[in-house]
Amino acid sequence: MTSNNQIGKRWIRPLPERLINKIAAGEVIERPAAVLKELLENSLDAGATRIDIAVEKSGLKSITVVDDGCGIDADQIEIAFSRHATSKIRDFNDLEELMSFGFRGEALPSIGSVSKTRMISRTADSDDGRELIIEGGVLQSVKAVAAPIGTKIEVMDLFYNTPARRKFLKTETTEARHLTRTATAMALSVPGVRFSYSLNGRRLFLLGKNADLMQARVAELLFGKENTPLLEVKYDSDKLNISGYLSFPDSCRRNRNGLYMYINRRYIFSPTLFHAITAGYGELLARGHFPAGALFLDIDPKRVDVNVHPTKAEVRLVEERQIHDLLYQVIKKSLRGSLGLPSASTAVEIRSAEENYTAAEAIRRLKNFMPDKDINNAPDMMDKLYGNQKTDSSNQAPESINQESEDTIKYINVAADDTVETKSGSETIRYLGQLSRLYLIFISGDELLVIDQHTAHERVLYEENLKAIELGKSISQNLLFPINIELTPERFAVYEEASEILTSAGIISQPFGATTVMLTAVSASLTKKSPEKIFEEILSDVENLHNGGEELTKAVAQSIACRAAIMSGDVITAEEAIGLYRRLKTVDNKHCCPHGRPVTLKLTKDELDKKFGRK
Ligand SMILES: Nc1ncnc2c1ncn2[C@@H]1O[C@H](COP(=O)(O)OP(=O)(O)OP(=O)(O)O)[C@@H](O)[C@H]1O
Ligand SMILES: [Mg+2]
């Protein structure tokens, strides 16, 4: 019999401090850029006005930071490398009002335990400095040396004693990119500090002291020219101040990397705030472009929790949603103000035969029903379609819409009851109306067509989705506010499997914690319902379809089509019905929906004749 007895008595012992530091280093120091960040934060906390950075071999050979800050007292330098020793907070209340970068007393012992580090520091009160050498967490020597006031720290052979971590690092180019981002982020936030940065023997920047000229620093560092025109953002209130400089729409970038965000001068990563800024640009931002610049939020430290993540890159905001909304408004107003555009959105209430629309809703619905090639004309079409109705209640049809397009739809006759006739090519169809809020009745030549609005729309959307997914051309609609959705572990597994396809289908999300997903955009056709609900329904459909043997791409396309399609019971207008008919003409299989239900029923003159006993 095997039992625990055979293992013998197991002692619970405290770990040696060296080992604790090494374990902590695994969290705090995940890559060379993290070392640089910790060192720069220490220099800024020490009140440096000048910081010089030199990095060799993308941080694996050495990372050196020299500052002219307050220095460390001779008798304190050893303590600085012991765990949880900090000069920055004394008790919990200090943590609540934190204004310094450091507070854990963890960075130096962590760095010291996974590298060979040499620090030389001197305070203004002392005539000479101290040099400390520590290797793999073992103190090698402390001695007096001649030194200028300030601190110089050299971190060499990073991860030399943790081969697993060293192996885990990405290529040198990737590490170099992270290092440069860290140096840039810091330099942007403190224009009052002279900064130089060399990487692998090349000086990447040398920035003079420019305390009042944040704009110049942002322009120089991010756009390469000190006089690049930038949008100034400024907003002050008792709760929150926002300031910074962002690119105008014409100098926005094709990637997200140009935007640096800070809370209380701490560089942070926040998808929520990123979203708010991008949303503030709204339609002024070209597709696939993102703003660049630096934006600073100053919030009462009590409302920010920085102690969330070991690298402090994530913060928790007490009123994240309000801050998101406010930031969105501020960006929108600043941008539109400086471009001379009206900032209030002019949502016009338009009454149609059956229901009330706002202008935006009308555009959305039109987009949902129109052939792709007409989508860009939607606002235009909307004006033409509904424009008359705004001022003229006689409900007369506009003469024509979109005359340039090759097969023009012509409104030949619009009766008060919404009966419309269209000509497309040689086919003339007349839309008679909707039966039981489900069947759309058309006359084409001498045939009577009955179309099931749900299955027809579903078929059209399914084929369009499939094509869009394959071509990566799905249209998605950003949510005004990203939503975190908690999934069960099983659902999360489905999500992970399908997430790439979902993204190509316009449902944009990213994992955010163990089984949580942050949803930032949904397919444009899905904006009618609650995004959370839609997302979960789609995952559930995809799981069922996939388990039933359906290919993932088809399962996603099918589920979105089904969820986005108009339902039985939905009232649709004549324009929408005709749009749907035209789209149905373009699909490969117009006879049945993806589940196999019929789409169209035809009654020919012959058949009618028979029924009426004429033949
Ligand atoms: N460049 C520097 N100039 C002056 N003092 C420094 C410098 N670097 C570190 N120190 C001193 O060493 C102490 C320990 O630094 P360390 O980075 O380990 O902890 P911290 O900054 O207090 O907290 P955190 O772990 O959150 O960074 C600091 O509290 C500070 O007193
Ligand atoms: Mg520190």
Image (cartoon, rainbow, N blue to C red):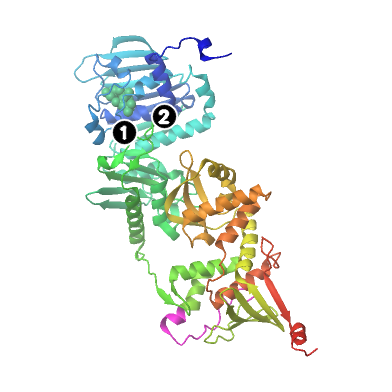
When the figure is inspected, residue 7 is found, relative to residue 250, above or below; the finding is: above
Q: Position of residue 159 (x, y in %)?
A: 47, 20
Q: Position of residue 315 (x, y in %)?
A: 35, 39
- Residue nearest the observer in this picture, 524 or 228: 524
Residue 208 showing in the rendered view: yes
**Can residue 396 be found in the magenta stretch?**
yes
Q: Is residue 179 left or right of residue 143?
A: right
Q: Name the amino acid type tagged 2.
A: Ala
> How many numbered marks does the figure carry?
2
Quarter of the figure with the N terminus: top right
The residues colored magenta run 387-407
When the figure is inspected, residue 329 is found, relative to residue 351, above or below; the finding is: above
Q: Is residue 276 left or right of residue 383?
A: left
- Residue under numbered circle 2: 34
Beta carbon at label 2 within 8 Å of ligand 1:
no
Task: Identify the residue shown where x is 31% and y is 24%.
Answer: 105
Q: Around disc 2, counting alpha carbons within 10 Å, would you say few (fewer than 14), some (14 to 19), or many (20 or more)?
A: some
Q: Quadrant of residue 183?
A: top left
Q: Name the amino acid type tagged 1.
A: Arg
- Residue nearest the observer in this picture, 216 or 135: 135
Number of the label disc, if any, that sits on residue 194: 1
Q: Residue furthest left?
A: 125
**Can residue 550 be found in the magenta stretch?**
no
Q: Secondary structure at mark 2?
A: helix
Q: Around disc 1, counting alpha carbons within 10 Å, would you say few (fewer than 14), some (14 to 19), or many (20 or more)?
A: some
Beta carbon at label 1 within 8 Å of ligand 1:
no
Q: Position of residue 611 (x, y in %)?
A: 75, 85
Q: Quadrant of residue 612?
A: bottom right
When the figure is inspected, residue 105 is found, relative to residue 386, above or below; the finding is: above
